[in-house]
Image (tube, rainbow, N blue to C red):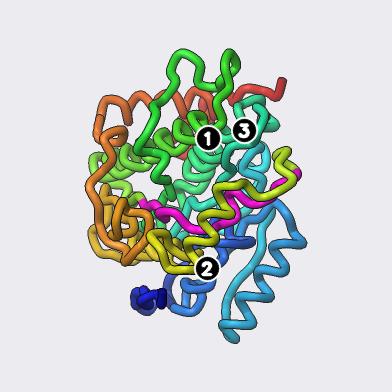
Amino acid sequence: MPRTPIDIVLPDLTSIRAVVTGASDGMGLVIATRLAAAGATLILPVRNRTKGEAAVARIRAQVADARVELRDLDLSSLASVAALGAELVAEGRPIHLLVNNAGVMTPPERQTTADGFELQFGTNHLGHVALVARLLPLLRAGSARVVSQVSIAANQGSINWSDLEWTRSYDGMRAYSQSKIALGLFALELDRRSRALGWGISSALSHPGIAPTSLLAARPELGRVDETAGRRIIRMLSARGILVGTVATAALPALLAATTADAGGRFFGPSGPGHLGGRPAEQRLYSRLRSADEAERVWRMSAELTGLSLDGTEGRGARMAR
């Protein structure tokens, strides 16, 4: 079945300095390439320099005059986040757009970050929380838009408050859902606090629907030597234009959230059946993301676990690796 082309037109972004996590491949690379094509100056923080250099080459092959630079970042290490933050703050150039896109999904066995957190919670949520906190002076200087990529998985499960790190009974999918719910609640609280305190930052949410991205591909470092059966099915459906999206269309909600005026506190995703694919559009917040009290609780918890006050200053000190 031929797929109806789906795309959006981005505005001129030549004055924008953008940071995109998880842009060394897949959906993040599409987001970065589209931003570069619209004129943005890109900072791509990457864990793997070799993959990052290949991504930059691909961007420049499509956008001859792309302004893009690599930086080092491992979101599963609070020390790495702090180092990048210190580096960028020392340079003193405002950031106008931050896309919190990177993530890991459902390692077969429970793994931990360098700081001892369950890997998905520590990377998808706490790593991005720490990045926002470390970059806050630059985000405020740039009156930035922060876009946090959640997931359809944030519409199921809950935050496991009695065992945030799944030490007693690990469930990879439930832990993944928790990480995305927590990130979504944090992002919405960031928007509320920015409005109340006059930070000038707007914070929006996006989700990509379902597409054959790299999240469920073979990831030997996560203990997954082959792509999952689910990804094989998604890849087949995507190729046939059935229900789900493509990697290119999955990137569009984040781009819409990044460039829509007054997007703060709003949620963007595919508008097709089940929100699995289709044209990007604003959507109603998932039920798990609607509680302001729960968002404030996530904010406080995130400050405690990262050791950051979340106003850009050090808190009581992050937990050391164990």
- Residue range in magenta is 206-220
Q: SS class of the residue under badge 2? A: helix
Task: Between residue 115 and residue 229, name the one nearer to us.
Answer: 229
- Residue at 26% across, 35% down: 287
Q: Mark 1 points at which residue?
A: 126
Task: Between residue 114 and residue 89, name the one nearer to us.
Answer: 114
Q: Position of residue 233 (x, y in %)?
A: 53, 54
Q: What residue type is labelled 3?
A: Leu
Marks 2 and 1 sit apart, C-alpha to C-alpha, by 24 Å
Disc nearer the start of the sequence (3/2): 2
Q: SS class of the residue under badge 1? A: helix
Quadrant position of residue 170: top right
- Residue at 51% across, 26% down: 315
Marks 3 and 2 sit apart, C-alpha to C-alpha, by 25 Å
- Residue at 57% across, 16% down: 169
Q: Name the residue under label 3.
A: 119
Q: What residue type is labelled 1?
A: Leu
Frontmost of labels 1 and 3 is 3
Left/right placement of residue 250 relative to residue 223 reads left
Q: Name the residue under label 2.
A: 30
- Characterize the local packing of mark 1: few (<14), some (14-19) or many (20 or more) Cα atoms within 10 angstroms: many
